[in-house]
Amino acid sequence: MRYANIKKEKTNGVVYTPTAMADYLSLEMIHYKPCNNNNIGSIRVLDPAVGKGELLISFINTFRKSCAVKIEAVGYETDAVICKETKKTLSKLFPDVELSIRNEDFLKAVEEQTTGLYDYVIANPPFIRTQIMGSEKAQEMCAKLNLSGRIDIYYAFIIYTNSILKDNGIAGYITSNKFLTIKSGAAVRNYMIDNCNLHRITDFGDTKLFSSSVLPCIIVFSKGKTTQPKDVLFTSVYEASVNTSDGDITNIFDAINKSGCYKTPDNKKYIYQQGIIQSLDKGKLWTIQSNKCQKWLSAVENKTWQRFSDIGKIHVGIKTTADNVFIGKDWNGDKANIELLRPLITHRNAGQILPDNTNLWQVLYTHTSINGKRTAYNIEDYPYAKKYLLKYFEQLSSRKYIIQAKRNWYEIWVPQNPESWKQRKIVFRDITEHPQFWLDTSGAVVNGDCYWIEIYEHITEDIVYLALAIANSRFIEKYYDIKFNTKLYSGKRRYISQYVEQFPIPLSTTELAQEAILLVKKIIAEKEQCSILSYKEKLNDIVDEIFT
């Protein structure tokens, strides 16, 4: 498992740690393993991805404020130049600390059992998705860690920590908050429940503490097993679009132990929540539970009849892996005679209940269905399409994963089921601040920047219309924020399968549900965006009342 040869910052996942965050993490770790001058002769602290040494600097300074024992500090860094610079910096700052900054791969050192054991492990490991690492390296890592799907390299750091932490040691990690709530993170979450004693999770959401697009969280843990949700403290901080606040703060960490809304000097407001982890069940998301939120969710649950997963199968749109070749809005001129072109729904068409833009792009769609089985068209039967695609032969044929899968060089990588497009579907945009779910019966293909619900045949129109009312409501934004507690930058939410499939649907025969259904029918019949604006507030009020 090597990652030293990936040098560019964009691909090696290097994100250097802000001082305020490093200080907060150090304090939390020492809180759970305080120093006792009388009983400790020395302590060993490790940063397995030391970088420029920010975390070790913070930890040593923080630790010394409460303890005068001898410190041995060890760091691993795969970049030889940075390793040399960090050693020089730390030696100058801490001449009395026993330092060992090793130009080695931490993961390999663990496998070779050369690391030793530590009282404290503090880390901000690199964030590298498996598709960036390369398929062979990714497969090797997945096999060793018993993981599957698209994983990040920091998963390995977390799992390996148990083997280098002393029995009474404490670890503090800064990671992307994605692993708290994505499906591929379930294996790591399950591992930590069984093998770690979780103490605290702090989700910093869209606070932009890093200059990169990483949305960070902090997790503090020791060896053991986690059995009670009440033992895992959970803090959540997310930017909010509100008019009032409970006070001013100089930085994010000033209110880290408070609840409420606080304003920073740049006039941004942040909502702070304090609670515990919502569930320790295997496979469940790690989100915050507060008494107020849990009461609200319980009330919603009492009014829930079905979920979105009951009305249809949710899919992500097609992935061509060569959009410049297959997708476009202009197929005129010398491209006018190209066969296999099909209308394509993209995020540009996104709207609430109705599409905002009915002008569809087109995709050169390379697949069909024969006897219920998906298959690629024989390009020899479509001379204009073949002539066009041959212009991009070098680009298309260089997609190694296509060749390895024994597919044709001209194929779209993920075409989905060609039979599904002709069915009625609810399409929704992947990343957006406000939900955008709309009905499509045109038979168009859906692009990968959107998802769609392939509605089951037995589901009635009324249920579909009720689902549209709920999915585009003010209520569902609140439900998403409380249930899943995750946002991207600028308040944007990710509407993906694992979240949307849990959206609630009430009984459709109640008076309020029928009123909501009637309003959606009117909007669809009038086919005008202005209709949505005139009915939207009333629809929001109805949906709120349904779940109250």
Image: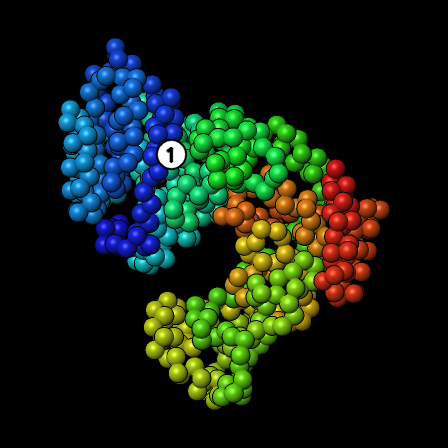
Closest to the observer, 448 or 184 = 448
Q: Is residue 137 above or below residue 105?
A: below
Q: Quadrant of residue 397?
A: bottom left
Closest to the observer, 434 or 500 = 434
- Residue 354 at x, y = what percent? 69, 62
Q: Amino acid at mark 1?
A: Met
Closest to the observer, 218 or 491 = 491
Residue furthest right as drawn = 511
- Residue 401 at x, y = what percent? 37, 67
Residue furthest top as drawn = 38
Q: Which residue is mark 1?
A: 21
Q: Residue at x 59, y 74 (%)?
A: 343
Q: Is residue 541 above or below residue 320?
A: above
Can residue 1 be spotted in the picture? yes
Q: How is the image coloured?
A: rainbow
319 on left or right of 300 = left
Q: In the picture, which quadrant includes the C terminus?
A: top right
Q: Is residue 231 above or below residue 546?
A: above
- Residue 517 at x, y = what percent? 79, 54
Q: Residue at x 30, y 24 (%)?
A: 62
- Residue 47 at x, y = what percent? 26, 35
SS category of the residue bearing label 1: helix
428 on left or right of 124 = right
Q: Residue at x 71, y 47 (%)?
A: 505
